[in-house]
């Protein structure tokens, strides 16, 4: 009984949120919808944890959807890499359920709240699906599910510009999705298979063809659009800025990470490191773009006056770190990438949660409006400071571990310029974070503002859980680093 | 190898900061808790650290930060010396701070004492750190926990001072120190402090070793080597007890302590002597010694002058580390203590003068000696000690530094140290001279007008200590026995 149940876990993590979403719509009540989301999200997190343990103990899991054996049916495949991503996605989803109630109550009209949770569940389903699937076309389908849900989530923002942002994202996201689909189509054309492992086996025979090369190019560009690699990032700042706070937290912490995971999966599992990085100069291209992202987006972040927009630009820069890591195509580089996917997800989640708490209080997060809130909202402000310092790479936080691993990965092959770029970008992060900190603590509150209290306990609780997780991963990073190392080994080992 | 008490000593002030915060409503109780914590910490370190003098190296690893790199505390003589100086002077500073903060009716006193305790916790963590990563964690914790102290007043001036403070300290540490640790790890495969250093057969080459040494020393922004010294004068916007403890003792001494520690346990004195990797930084330190003294002369603001004097004196210790001689390490180590006692006295005096008369500038002190004889006598004693003139403790550290310079074959450094002593006399002794021998300004009080006792007693004790260390330098020689002449 128990083993039978355990065997079905990979499917459950997708099916649960998929089924729960229409339930939310049927229930139609704000509180009930929230309850459904709460239970589903925590159940998914528990499943992800069980899967993590299973994979750690017993190695990769293969699950044949509907009993059709791969490569004919859809295969769900969990290995050292995607269990980590799955844990992050469901973990953030679960904490969002704690955070959401108070935040959603003030940002979304009560009669539409059930739609918000339904969309959030679909987004969770899509992201979890991308993560666990071993089928290339299935990945595209889940990508579209999560994207369509995200457009809806962003459009529910309080300002009218949210609609425009969602539309902008929709255009860019659809182009990205289409590119990905074309790329997958090319691969299908040449190999006759959609199962990733199967494609990987058949690909070497046709690797010399222009079609496969074009397929790779389409997939790289398509995925890069989804995770907003410079210069394909223009949709991101608006989307993150105008989305409802909870949606910002969830999307910023997980959505781009999953798209990054998808690209890593294609490059290393399907194409193989030797093909993508030795035969084609993909590594150099990605490294140049990642450096450009790190520096230009950090600079742009410095000049923002809206905290959420500032954090959005910071995300674009941080994605540069992750891309640089796997673009090195070395075990150390991939380890750094995977660790930073997790660390950045946690850090950005915490920062957007803190920003959302400030928004909850002030209905705005411009630097002028949050001036002087450090006194009246000590917990929220302190959370922002600690998570912000983690972005800079201050030790005893997860950001330090990421930076250490990435520096190790670039210094070992003697690429000191990349190390310099990483460090300069970190210090730019100090400047933009400190602009917020000074606004919170040093600027006087505007005339006439009455004394205000803290954000609701539930919001603070969720924020501080992420902050403490971030600190825990900073002083005891060995489990994460070892998990990332296992992921790197499995990726490079499976490459053709 | 399981001496968890090391970790408890590090955590103790941090834990007690919670108690301090809880006692915020009862200032007397709060200060009692602070002082008791300080005294207990000092006693604990002195008692438990005793065996280190006989060669024990207690060590504890709490957990693995990264695979193979632990959160490790190891106690060795240099660390014990720094921990004793920092915790010992913290006791006095807490008493002084209580007098000062009340005398000037400062706001947010509870916050002040809480971060004070956290800063000491970080300083002890630095002293006990057993590897570079642990050291780095506490180094940044010290920077961050002192930031709210530096910006205590919360006005524009302190915000700008805080920007320079945090900007330089974080930039240098993350920009230089972090990559230096990573390179060390990649080259030698270890970040653990080891007798004789890590690079003996790492094949780093002279240029590589020199560059890495430079990266480390500039990465230690708290050592205030030029051109990264600006944070120290900027930090003078803080209340005086902060300047006294942190910017004369804990923070800056953490910087030069790290320089010594790196030279001894990461590079190794013999390795530095053999390769000459530290010579470029020795000249940087020389320039800092002389340059900062020259700037100090031009400063009329008393605390700014003391700040530049600190910049200059810190580089004495860096000189001791970079001259690649055991006697240099001994001299540098002793100077950590000697300078700490002298400089904290000077800052205590500056604060006492401000509390009693609200004067901040050297030119306002004419004839004030008659109203504040104890303060200015203490100032005189400490100045003489800093100049390295008997009968004050400062002579001993300067003596060994000069011996070390001769031993390492750097005769020019002896000359530099001599010139610096003269400069010290010019810009420091001017102050008691003005106070005692110049004609008082019309508004200067003639009658007894000392600061509160809580201020005067600590500065008398530290000044007296400078004399005691001249007569009885034995504890330092015993503690630093590994580098002492046989």
Image (tube, grey):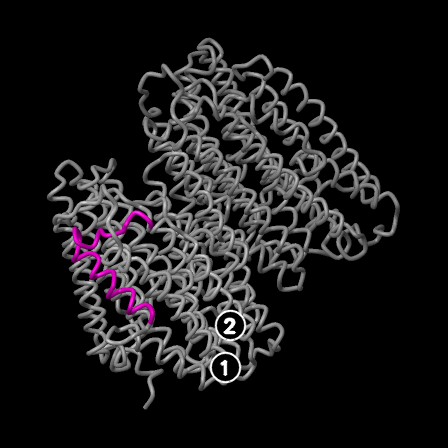
Cβ–Cβ under 8 Å for marks 2 and 1: yes
Ranked by sequence position, the earlier of labels 2 and 1 is 2
Image point 28% across, 65% down: which residue? Answer: B83
Magenta span includes B281: no
Whether residue A166 sits left or right of residue B261 in the image: it is right
Of A78 and B410, the residue lying toward us = B410
Whether residue B48 sits left or right of residue B239 in the image: it is left
Judging by the rendered image, the residue that carries numbered circle 2 is B282
Q: Is residue A209 above or below residue A436?
A: below
Residue B269, numbered circle = none
Q: Is residue A480 above or below residue B187?
A: above
Q: CA distance from mark 2 to mark 1?
A: 10 Å
Judging by the rendered image, the residue that carries numbered circle 1 is B410
Magenta stretch: give its range: B363-387
Q: Is residue B144 above or below residue A376?
A: below
Whether residue B313 sits left or right of residue A176 in the image: it is left
Can residue B95 be seen at all in this image of the molecule? Answer: no
Q: Chain of mark 1?
A: B
Instruction: Where is residue B147? Give x, y as percent.
Output: 37, 45
Position of the C terminus of chain A by quadrant: bottom right
So how many labels did they put on this image? 2
């Amino acid at each position: 009984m128990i083993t039978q149940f355990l065997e079905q876990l990979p499917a459950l993590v997708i099916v649960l949120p998929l089924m729960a979403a229409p339930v939310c719509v049927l229930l139609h009540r704000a509180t009930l919808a929230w309850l459904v989301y709460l239970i589903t999200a925590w159940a998914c997190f528990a499943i992800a944890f069980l899967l993590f343990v299973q994979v750690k103990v017993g190695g990769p899991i293969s699950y044949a959807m509907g009993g059709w054996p791969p490569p004919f049916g859809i295969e769900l495949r969990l290995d050292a890499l995607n269990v980590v991503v799955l844990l992050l996605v469901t973990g953030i989803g679960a904490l969002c359920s704690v955070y959401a109630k108070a935040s959603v109550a003030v940002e979304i009209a009560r009669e539409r709240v059930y739609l918000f949770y339904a969309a959030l569940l679909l987004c969770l389903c899509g992201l979890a699906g991308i993560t666990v699937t071993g089928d290339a076309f299935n990945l595209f389908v889940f990508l579209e599910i999560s994207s369509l849900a995200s457009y809806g989530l962003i459009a529910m923002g309080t300002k009218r510009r949210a609609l425009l942002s969602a539309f902008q994202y929709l255009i860019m996201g659809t182009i990205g999705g289409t590119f990905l689909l074309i790329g997958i189509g090319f691969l299908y054309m040449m190999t006759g298979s959609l199962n990733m492992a199967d494609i990987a086996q058949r690909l070497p025979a046709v690797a010399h063809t222009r079609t496969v090369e074009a397929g790779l190019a389409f997939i790289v560009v398509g995925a890069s659009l989804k995770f907003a690699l410079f210069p394909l990032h223009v949709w991101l700042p608006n989307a993150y800025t105008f989305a409802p706070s909870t949606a910002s937290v969830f999307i910023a912490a997980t959505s781009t990470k999953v798209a990054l995971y998808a690209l890593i999966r294609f490059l290393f599992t399907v194409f193989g490191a030797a093909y993508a990085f030795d035969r084609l100069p993909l590594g150099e291209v990605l490294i140049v773009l990642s450096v450009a992202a790190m520096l230009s987006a950090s600079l742009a972040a410095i000049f923002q006056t809206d905290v959420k927009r500032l954090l959005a630009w910071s995300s674009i820069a941080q994605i540069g770190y992750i891309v640089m890591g796997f673009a090195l195509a070395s075990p150390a580089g991939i380890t750094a990438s995977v660790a930073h996917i997790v660390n950045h997800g946690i850090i950005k989640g915490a920062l957007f949660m803190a920003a959302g708490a400030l928004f909850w209080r002030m209905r705005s997060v411009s630097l002028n409006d949050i001036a002087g809130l450090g006194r009246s909202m000590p917990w929220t402000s302190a959370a922002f400071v600690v998570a912000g310092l983690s972005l800079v790479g201050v030790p005893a936080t997860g950001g330090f571990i990421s930076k250490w691993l990435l520096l190790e990965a670039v210094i070992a092959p003697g690429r000191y310029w990349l190390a310099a770029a990483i460090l300069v970008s970190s210090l730019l992060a100090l400047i933009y974070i400190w602009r917020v900190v000074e606004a919170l603590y040093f600027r006087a509150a505007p005339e006439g503002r009455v004394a205000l209290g803290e954000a609701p306990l539930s919001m603070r609780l969720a924020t501080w859980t992420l902050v403490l997780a971030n600190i825990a991963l900073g002083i005891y990073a060995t489990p994460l680093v070892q998990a990332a190392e296992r992921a790197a080994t499995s990726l490079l080992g499976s490459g053709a | 190898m399981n001496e968890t008490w090391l970790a408890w000593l590090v955590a103790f002030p941090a834990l007690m900061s919670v108690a301090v915060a809880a006692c915020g409503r009862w200032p007397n109780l709060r200060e009692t808790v602070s002082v008791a914590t300080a005294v207990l910490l000092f006693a604990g370190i002195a008692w438990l650290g005793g065996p280190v003098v006989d060669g024990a190296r207690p060590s504890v690893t709490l957990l693995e930060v990264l695979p193979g790199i632990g959160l490790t505390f190891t106690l060795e003589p240099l660390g014990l010396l720094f921990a004793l100086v920092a915790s010992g002077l913290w006791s006095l500073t807490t008493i002084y701070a209580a007098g000062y903060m009340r005398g000037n009716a400062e706001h947010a006193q509870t916050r002040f004492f809480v971060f004070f305790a956290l800063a000491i916790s970080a300083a002890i963590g630095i002293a006990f750190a057993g590897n570079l990563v642990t050291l780095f964690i506490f180094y940044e914790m010290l920077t961050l926990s002192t930031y709210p102290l530096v910006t205590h007043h919360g006005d524009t001036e302190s915000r700008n001072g805080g920007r320079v403070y945090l900007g330089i300290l974080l930039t240098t540490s993350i920009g230089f120190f972090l990559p230096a640790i990573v390179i060390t790890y990649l080259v030698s495969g270890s970040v653990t402090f080891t007798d004789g250093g890590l690079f003996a057969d790492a094949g780093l080459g002279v240029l590589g070793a020199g560059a890495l040494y430079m990266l480390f020393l500039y990465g230690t922004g708290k050592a205030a080597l030029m051109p990264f010294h600006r944070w120290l004068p900027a930090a003078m916007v803080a209340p005086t007890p902060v300047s006294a403890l942190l910017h004369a003792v804990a923070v800056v001494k953490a910087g030069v302590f790290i320089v010594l520690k790196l030279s001894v346990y990461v590079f190794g004195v013999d390795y530095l002597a053999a390769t000459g990797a530290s010579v470029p930084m020795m000249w940087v330190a020389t320039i800092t010694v002389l340059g900062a003294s020259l700037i100090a002369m031009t400063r009329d603001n008393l605390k700014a002058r003391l700040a530049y004097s600190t910049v200059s004196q810190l580089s004495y210790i860096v000189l001791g580390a970079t001259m690649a001689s055991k006697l240099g390490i001994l001299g540098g180590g002793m100077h950590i203590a000697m300078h700490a006692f002298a400089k904290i006295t000077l800052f205590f005096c500056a604060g006492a003068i401000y509390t009693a008369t609200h004067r901040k500038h050297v030119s306002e002190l004419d004839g004030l000696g008659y109203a504040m004889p104890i303060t200015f006598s203490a100032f005189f004693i400490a100045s003489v000690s800093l100049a390295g003139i008997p009968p004050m403790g400062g002579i001993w550290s300067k003596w060994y530094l000069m011996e070390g310079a001769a031993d390492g074959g750097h005769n020019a450094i002896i000359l530099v140290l001599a010139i610096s002593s003269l400069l010290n006399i010019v810009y420091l002794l001017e102050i008691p001279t003005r106070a005692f021998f110049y004609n008082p300004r019309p508004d200067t009080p003639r009658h007894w007008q000392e600061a509160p006792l809580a201020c005067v007693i600590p500065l008398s004790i530290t000044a007296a200590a400078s004399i005691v260390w001249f007569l009885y330098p034995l504890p330092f020689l015993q503690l630093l026995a590994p580098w002492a002449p046989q």
